[in-house]
Amino acid sequence: MDNEKLLPLHHGDDISEAKPQPPSQSKKVGTALFYATSSLGVIFANKIVLSTYQFPSVLLLALLQFTSTTLALKVASMLGFIDLLPISVKGVKSILPLSTCYLLNILTGLSATQNLSLPMMVLLRRASILMTMLLEKWMLNSQPSKTVQVSVGLMLGGALVAALGDLSFNLLGYIVIFFNDLFTALNGVILKRTSEEYKKSKMTVLYLNSLLSATGVSIIILLVPGEVERVQNFALWSNSSFVSFLVFASLMGSVLNLAIFLCTSTNSALTTTVVGCLKNVLTSYIGMFIGGDYIFSWLSFIGINISIAGSLVYARSTFKG
């Protein structure tokens, strides 16, 4: 997991004695840009599939993304590019709470993408930072700095102003994004309390999360009345453009996970966090023109910019801290 390069694993003496070379500046910048581009690609592809083409099944899209990630990690393991720890019943039980939060986080996130404009979704997603702060203080006795508290206040204040001016208000979208924030926060906090064995292999955690989530969402699809029929009766299966975006959205989930791994291992977790914050700035502005569901109002626009300012302060504080 800590290898700088994704190369097949060998254990010869020559390799074990060689000192790893620090990554070049161009590689650091390249992996950060790869992460930002991949993350933007996933968000916009999901939005186009669910809103522009009005694909009716968040569950099927989630299943395709879980499946592609599971298969990609398994193939990478078989080829020797990554190490996956052996799966045991005890290990599955220990990681089940995390996998449940991961599944609910993805499902509510896709549902929010379907029901909210991208600028509002990104804005309201920042409430997860406050929830994470509160949960970490309660469960891990963690205390954020004053600067982080102020930046979170700016982000949430801007979100409140923007919500008051949201002319495309969707109650279901607001409810779903609230739960998405909650599950995002729980996912992060529970991950920190996961057994030390699995903490050593983030790829194993990701693999188990994806595998268990794919199994869970398959069961949900079969149990939800009319879900299979809605998918079968969708009118655009013969539309090559829609199918291309659906395949792209399905595959980009695994590409994004690879990008996060490369960015974090080549740079640091802090850099990945900061790039994520700055990427959300682009999503907020570009998202006004994608999906066709953002309605401009000055109050909403001002709120978005206040929240973006808070996001930049948060990114600077995280990078310095």
Image (tube, helix red, strand yellow):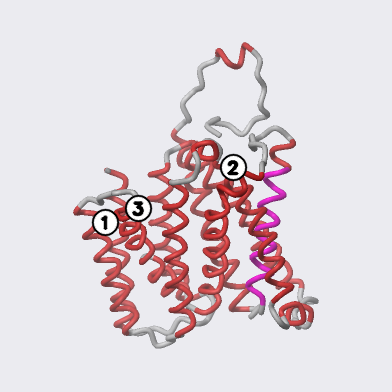
The number of discs equals 3
| Left or right: 56 as drawn, with respect to 312 | right
Vertical relation: 142 (above or below) 230: above
Residue at position x 22%, y 50% from top? 145
Point out the image quarter for the N terminus: top right
Q: Is residue 9 above or below residue 177?
A: above
Q: Residues within 10 Å of mark 1 (few under 14, many from 20)?
A: many
Q: Residues within 10 Å of mark 3 (few under 14, many from 20)?
A: few
| Residue, far left | 146
Quickly name the residue at label 1: 313
Segment tinted magenta in the rendering: 57-74
Residue closer to the observer: 193 or 9: 193
Which of the labelled discs sits on residue 139, or is there none?
A: 3
Residue 206 shown left or right of residue 162 in the figure: right
| Tag in front: 3 or 1 | 3
Q: Position of residue 286 (x, y in %)?
A: 46, 69
Q: Is residue 63 magenta?
A: yes
Badge 1 amino acid: Val
